[in-house]
Amino acid sequence: MKTIAFDTSNQPLSVAIFEDDKLVDQRATNVLKNHSVQLLPFMDELLKAASWQPNDLDQVIVSQGPGSYTGLRIAVTTAKTLAFTLNLALVGVSSLALLAANVMATDKLIVPIMDARNDNMYVGGYRYLAGRLTSVQADRHSNLQKLIDDLKTTATDVIFVGEIGRFEVALREALPTAEFSTTNLPNAANLMMLAELEKPITDIDAIHQFVPNYLRLSQAEVDWAKAHPGVSHDGFVEKV
C-alpha cells in the first residue's frame, strides 16, 4: 500500500510518503511561505523521486487540526481532493498528536502545545499505553493559567512539546519538575504510526463531511454570532 501524508497545521510544512508502513521519503520546511504554493510541488517532488504516479497511491493521511485556520483548510481540502479524484482512503490525525509523537516512549504525560495567541493555546494530553501513543486528555482550546491549574491537579511528571517558547518561563515556574522537548516541529514521518489508530474513510459521503477540527470558532464566526444572537450559523458556514 502506498500512502502520502502531510501536515500544514501551522508555519512548518511536512510531507512524507510510505510503502506499507515504511517511510520512503519526506520533505519539510519551516519558512513563512504560502503552503498553498508549496504543498503540491513538495508532493510532486516526492512522487517523482520514488518513481510513483499519483494513481499508484492508495491512501492519504492529513493532520486534521487544531491549528492555523488557513493551513488546515489547505491540508484538508487537498486531502479530500486527492481522495475524491484518485479514489484513496482518507485518514485524519490530530495535529497535537503529531507534535506529541516527537517524544520517544516514556511513562510521563506528554502535553503538546500550539500557540493560539493572547495567552491562549491548543493543548492535549498523551501517554504511551502498551507502546502506542494514546490521547488521555482531550485536545482542547485553553489558556495558560487553566493549563497550569489542570496539570497541578492531574499530573506530576510532564513533558511539554510544540510551541512552548512563549509559555516556557511561566510553565517552569509553576511546574518546576516539568521537562521540555527540544524537538518541537511536526514531522509527517510520524503520521503513519498515528493513522494506525484511526479508521480510514472510504465512503464518498463521509469524505465530503470530513472537515478540519478547529476546536474554536474563527473570528468571523465569533463576530457573526455576536451580531445574530440565538441564531445558529451552521446552515450558512461550510467548514471547508
Image: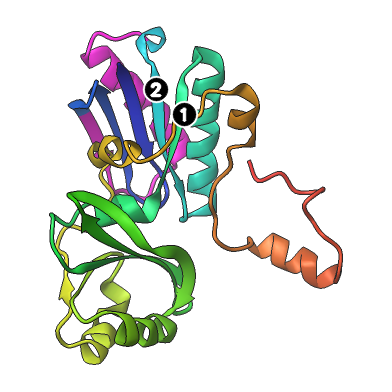
Q: Position of residue 205 (x, y in %)?
A: 65, 27
Say whether marks 1 and 2 touch (CB < 8 Å).
yes
Q: If the image is split into quadrants, where does the N terminus sit? A: top left
Looking at the rendered structure, the secondary structure element under dot 1 is strand
**Spatial distance from mark 1 to mark 2, Cα to Cα?**
6 Å
The disc placed on residue 59 is: 2
Name the residue type under label 2. Answer: Gln
Inspect the magenta stretch and tell me whether residue 52 lies in it: yes
Residue located beneath label 1 in the image? 90
Q: What's the residue at 22%, 15% (across, down)?
A: 49
Q: Can residue 185 be seen in the rendering of this structure?
A: no
Q: Position of residue 23 (x, y in %)?
A: 18, 28
Residue 199 occupies quadrant:
top left
Magenta range: 26-53
Q: What's the residue at 34%, 25% (across, down)?
A: 4
Residue 17 occupies quadrant:
top left
Q: Position of residue 174 (x, y in %)?
A: 26, 90
Inspect the magenta stretch and tell me whether residue 226 lies in it: no
